[in-house]
Image (cartoon, grey):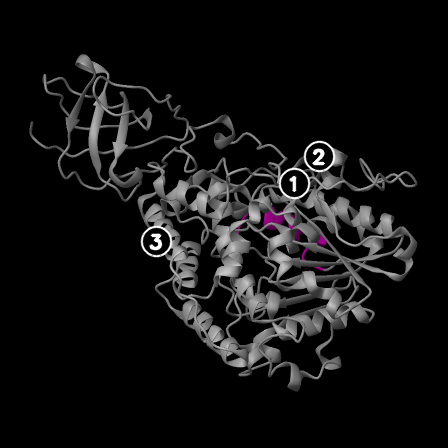
Amino acid sequence: MKAVPVYLLFQPANVLVPNRKLQDSQEVNWAGIVSIERVQGKTGEHINQGDYVPTRHRGGGTHQGEVDKVVTDDAGAHEEDVANPPKMRLSILVVSLIHGAFLSPALLGASPLHHGSSVSNPGQDLISVLSSAAENPIVDGRVSDTVSNIRSSIAADRSFHAAGDETVQLAWKKIETIFTNRTSSTLLDFVHSIVVSGLLPSNLLSFLNGYLNNNINSGYNMNPDLDRERIYPSRAAKDALYSIPEEALRQAIYVSNFSPSGRNERKPVILVPGTAAPAGTTYYFNFGKLGSAIPAADVVWVNVPDASLGDVQVNAEYIAYAINYISTLYQTKVSVISWSQGGLNTQWALKYWPSTRDVVEDFIALSPDFRGTIVSTLACPWLAGTVCTPALWQQGSDTKFVHTLRGLGGDSAYVPTTTIYSSFDEVVQPMRGDQASAILQDSHGVGVSNNHLQTICPHKPAGGIYTHEGVLYNPLAWALTIDALTHDGPGDPSRLDVGKVCQRLLPPQLSLDDMLGTEGLLLVSMSEVLRYTPKTFTEPDIIGYASIVPGVAESGIRREREI
């Protein structure tokens, strides 16, 4: 048979057929309505445009791959070789990327379930997630190759050996090299570089490998009911109504150190996680240790389901509820520390649940993306960013979600707010100048300080190459956070010994393992993005309570139409 080119065009409305056997061929991986030109079977019949055909690709079936076989049910269910065809041209490839799952209604736009799975994942750990992705025949070939390399590198002992400050300096130089290397451009690239460089010694890898079954990430915590005060389905008349059952909202809160008898002497601090990172693991190596700096602080955190990869509007419900729940439990105001998407979650909660503003005395946002980010597909290299998770779609710089949040005063703080950010953020950009995504205005007059590390500590260690996650262990970020929590109003650099703070690489409360463990969050984030399903083609619609406000959902339409 003469070799002929094959061109595939998958439409978003395709319906995939189940696995099935075709004569002596291997099991077909997936199939869809495709457009094929100039392909003939052995008996001469044409496979016409619009025919149903199962297809199989070398290396996993990607827009970069080449077609090995065309299998058709016509003329006796046979296979035809296609030798060295050109790379496929496609507009939308409708295929699940995780665990060989077939297309579901949710992937085509139906709302995903609000609830995550139990923290108990028997037989599953980070390594098994990587193995599944590396061996999955329908994962993008480049992704599976990189994941396979990461898995192999984890098995090798590449940890550097030094002591004391020398080790901190060496680790810092390695991190600096990784994040200034222009060949790294995606989350997978950064993770691979971190693992290969030996930045994650065996003790940290062991901890990170078991994150799926670590109780600190549990979404099923037994917290007491609040009998004295009603906060559900809303606390005040102007609050949006929750769409999630109260039990699920309450169980997501991890309260580590509460005593009714001593609560009047305690200062509750709610830690809100970022995208693709469970809260317990996120803060274990950094602000989970805030009590060493402020003994009266009781840190609690919110384990948002699906590692905050689902709809940010839904994620924000967990934060709004946690604020009102913890303030009622402790009978005092609370402070909130957020990282990454956690800033969006908190700002959305403050905007649409106004009752929360009365009980939050400080909001400290680390590496927030209040304007979204121009590199929102960094963590979604599959199919050139064609499919992604809802939360990552929503965090683009020109999305309905971001425009809705910022509209009608949402670009200004609702409570005393301290933002802290770095120019070298690999996830959120821009992060310098007047258009930095982390900046909030103060039109409500509550008090805001926007703190750019490189401006406050120019050409000093604390103003160096701190990444998106690196801000969590930055000494200036810690100093400003402590200042905000121990004074009225936002953090103020003028109250700090900036000369001393800027000379440090780490705050006094943290160690080398804390720095490396925090960078290891990227490995967990990669695992969570690989695990999340279903992927989607665009951001979710704005929920009713926000979309009915005039003028808040004008953007993002162009992106939907392009897709």
Residue 446, compared with residue 559, is above or below; it is: below
Crowd around label 2: few <14 · some 14–19 · many ≥20 (10 Å): some
Q: Residue at x 57, y 65 (%)?
A: 436
Q: Amino acid at mark 2?
A: Ile
Disc 1 target residue: 314
| Residue farthest along the bottom direction in this orientation | 499
| Residue farthest along the top direction in this orientation | 76
213 relative to 76 in the view: left or right: right
Find out whether residue 375 is within the magenta segment: no
Label 1 and label 2: CA atoms lie apart by 8 Å
Label 2 and label 3: CA atoms lie apart by 40 Å
Disc 2 target residue: 244
Q: Quadrant of the N terminus?
A: top left
Query: Which region shows up in magenta?
Result: 397-412
Q: Main secondary structure of the magenta part?
A: helix
Q: Amino acid at mark 3?
A: Asn
Q: Which sits earlier in the primary sequence, circle 3 or circle 1?
A: 3
Label 3 and label 1: CA atoms lie apart by 35 Å
Disc 3 target residue: 149
Q: In this orientation, does residue 427 appear?
A: no
Question: What is the x, y in percent for residue 13?
Answer: 41, 27
Q: Which sits earlier in the primary sequence, circle 1 or circle 2?
A: 2
Q: Nearer the viewer, residue 17 or 36?
A: 17
Find out whether residue 405 is within the magenta segment: yes
19 relative to 355 in the view: left or right: left
Q: Residue at x 84, y 54 (%)?
A: 359
Residue 498, compared with residue 158, is above or below; it is: below
CB atoms at circles 2 and 3 under 8 Å apart?
Answer: no
Q: Amino acid at mark 1?
A: Val
